[in-house]
Amino acid sequence: MTDSPTASQSGVRSRIEGLRDSEPADRRAAVAAAAGLDGAAMEALSDATALPLSVANGMIENVIGTFELPLGVATNFVVNGREYLVPMAVEEPSVVAAASYMAKLARAGGGFTVSSTAPIMRAQIQIVGLGDPFGARAALLAHRDELIALANTRDSVLVGLGGGCKDIEIEVFASSPIGPMVVMHLLVDVRDSMGANAVNSMAELLAPRVEAISGGQVRLRILSNLADRRVVTASVRVPAEALTTRAHDGTEVARRIVEACALALIDPYRAATHNKGIMNGIDPVVVATGNDWRAIEAGAHAYAARSGRYTSLTTWEIAADGALVGTLEMPMALGIVGGATRTHPAAQAALRLMRIGSAQEMAEVTAAVGLAQNMAALRALATEGIQRGHMTLHARNIAITAGATGGDVDRVAKAIVAAGDVSVAHAKKVLEGA
């Protein structure tokens, strides 16, 4: 298995040997060299005071301090032929390691292939108090061009970049708990922003004119986090032989992964956990880059239930040549301008680490991480079970909980893993026997 020949095109080497066994300072140096980051960017990613209290105080209300999460870097990713190092802010052991290892296996098939639609977001304008909802719909559609033009007066910069309101849709709810209702959707190309502020501002601007045209009263004027016009599709093709383990042939592993996914496709109880595993990969990237992980979560789960039945966001299949093929499709409303992506120093540095050029590229890389994480979970579940690898990586946390510090952390962790008893009680015994 060799490095992708496209590494020089992106200027990044995502394969870094020995990173897991290095100390944090050595890891930072290796990542900086691989990504070509300057000292200031690496300091923002490594310094516990990267977010000054004065900046935090301006970001939200009633600030009393800041809250830290471990920041790791997932390696080995090749997405659309380009190499990426991916920052991940997460507290759960095994997530970064699993994503990195699956990305390494994916290189055998050329990495991840991802595509995405235009960054279209929806704003909803709710209209009530209507006796003729279908007549109101017709009137609003007759004023379509006028409403689009009015919306685009709100953000000349966005329009100048090629974005702005592109269309409107009207939905009629002839019956609701409060009577007939019409909902007008503004479809807005938000370019490299997440888009909430842009679409909300347009919706509020249009409200008086919508009332005048429809004859109703406008209530809600707000974006929808079901960004079903802003969808990313990621796929990976892994040769069966790359999946071989000490205990299982690769062809068998591929078959077991497909069988494991089948349960998530038909059973919402399994699908909820299955999709949570996908988000184990996606959320840490979203958090590290200062994006809204709650919006991504809401959109993902709503999309998983769009048929009326909650199901898996991924599918896994066996190709004619025996290769394992996985596909992930979901909304991905990410931005690289505005919000915390521009105010949080570490988020800015994380984007520089990834060398992201657009919000669509950001969405595509993030989706690849989600697909890798899903493959890791299914592979573990279908072979040795999820706990063995997870608890091995969790052993350091257990050692720290038991009171280990400094060099004792690794010593105790290794001892409890070797004993097959990764528990606080056993860790305390090992520590006390020092």
Image (cartoon, grey):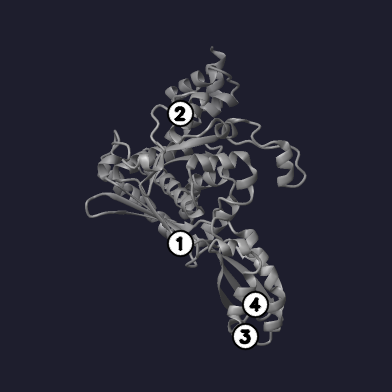
Asked whether 61 or 344 is in front, the reply is 344
Which residue is identified by label 4? 176
295 shown above or below 430: below
Which residue is identified by label 3? 139
Q: Is residue 407 left or right of residue 247?
A: right
- Cα distance between the residues tagged 4 and 2: 59 Å
Which residue is identified by label 2? 30
Mark seen at residue 117: 1
Q: Is residue 204 left or right of residue 308?
A: right
Task: Answer few, some or many: residues within 10 Å of disc 2's Cα (few below 14, many 20 plus, some between 14 and 19).
Answer: some
Image location of residue 329, percent across then percent down: 43, 58
Image location of residue 408, percent across then percent down: 54, 17
Which of discs 4 and 1 lies nearer the camera? The answer is 1
12 shown above or below 151: above
Image location of residue 198, percent across then percent down: 63, 62
- Cα distance between the residues tagged 2 and 1: 35 Å
Label 3: element kind: helix
User: Closer to the N terminus: mark 1 or mark 3?
Assistant: 1
